[in-house]
Image (cartoon, helix red, strand yellow):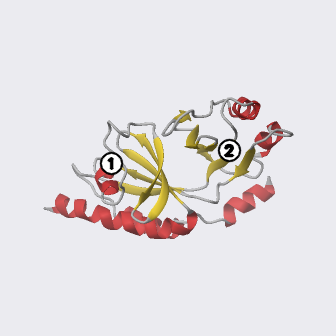
């Protein structure tokens, strides 16, 4: 317990130094858009063949089925959920709490002697939350994926790029997107997104 408390006190999220920068970039009004970091969320990489004993073992521990197809997200988007990455690769995420040591232990134990993998990736990526009526328009400046609601409805997640940064992109609400860059790209992507938001601030002033 003391070790976990010390870890939480000492660690710094990839975009923590830009918190004030993001807050100052808030756009209000009819074309509002905001950007925030959701730090230290639980992120666990999973590997298992679909419909296998390994997949069932992971599902039993998670209490959530693994996604079966591209773009699918299973579970609770406000809590624990699982994103599809490839036919046998998934990312389990819990945005309702911070990652602590041992989060992956029960999943590793469930795979004991079985093919598959459960790996704590919480430090691999951070989560940026872009929200507001203009969120989609901001992303469309640098994302080649079709983000129209017909093609990318609420609850879907895809592997794509924003600008030059490879990301996971999860449409977590009607006007909310969670963007997962690798930690080393977080600073660049925050600055790219804030720059893309500036257009809507100018329109709001006018």
Q: Nearer the viewer, residue 206 or 143?
A: 143
Image x and y of residue 58, in percent = 72, 35
Q: Residue at x 57, y 64 (%)?
A: 183
Image x and y of residue 195, in percent = 32, 68
Q: Which mark is residue 132?
A: 1
> Image height check: is 136 above or below 26?
above
Quarter of the image where one finds residue 182: bottom right
State the CA–CA distance, disc 2 to disc 1. 32 Å
Q: Residue furthest right?
A: 113
Quarter of the image where one finds residue 83: top right
Q: Residues within 10 Å of mark 1 (few under 14, many from 20)?
A: many
* Secondary structure of residue under mark 2: strand
Q: Residue at x 47, y 46 (%)?
A: 158
Q: Residue at x 56, y 41 (%)?
A: 84
Q: Quadrant of the C terminus?
A: bottom left
Q: Residue furthest left?
A: 206
Answer whether residue 24 is visible to the viewer in this image: no
Image x and y of residue 95, in percent = 57, 45
> Image height check: is 65 above or below 40?
above
Q: Residue at x 63, y 49 (%)?
A: 43
Image x and y of residue 28, in percent = 26, 54
Whichever of callouts 2 and 1 sits on the residue coming sooner in the sequence is 2
Looking at the rendered structure, the number of numbered marks drawn on it comes to 2
In the picture provided, is 120 more to the left or to the right than 75? right
Quarter of the image where one finds residue 51: top right
Q: Which mark is residue 16?
A: none
In the picture provided, is 101 more to the left or to the right than 99? right
Answer whether residue 90 is visible to the viewer in this image: yes
> Image height check: is 116 above or below 199?
above
* Secondary structure of residue under mark 1: loop
Q: Residues within 10 Å of mark 2 (few under 14, many from 20)?
A: many
Residue with the mark numbered 2: 46
């Amino acid at each position: 317990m003391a070790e976990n408390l010390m870890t939480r006190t000492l660690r710094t999220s990839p975009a923590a130094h830009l918190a004030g920068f993001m807050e100052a970039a808030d756009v209000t009004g009819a074309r509002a858009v905001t950007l925030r970091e959701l730090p230290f969320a639980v992120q666990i990489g999973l590997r298992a063949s679909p419909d296998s004993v390994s997949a069932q073992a992971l599902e039993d521990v998670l209490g959530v089925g693994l996604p079966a197809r591209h773009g699918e997200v299973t579970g609770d988007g406000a809590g624990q959920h699982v994103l599809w990455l490839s036919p046998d690769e998934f990312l389990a995420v819990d945005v309702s709490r911070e990652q602590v040591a041992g989060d992956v232990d029960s999943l590793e134990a469930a795979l004991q002697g079985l093919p598959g993998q459960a790996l704590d990736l919480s430090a691999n990526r951070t989560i940026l939350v872009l929200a507001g009526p203009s969120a989609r328009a901001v992303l469309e400046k640098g994302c080649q994926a079709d983000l129209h609601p017909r093609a990318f409805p609420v609850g879907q997640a895809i592997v794509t790029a924003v600008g030059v940064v490879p990301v996971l992109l999860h449409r977590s609400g009607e006007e909310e997107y969670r963007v997962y860059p690798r930690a080393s790209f977080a600073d660049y992507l925050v600055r790219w997104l804030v720059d893309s938001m500036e257009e809507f601030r100018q329109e709001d002033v006018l």
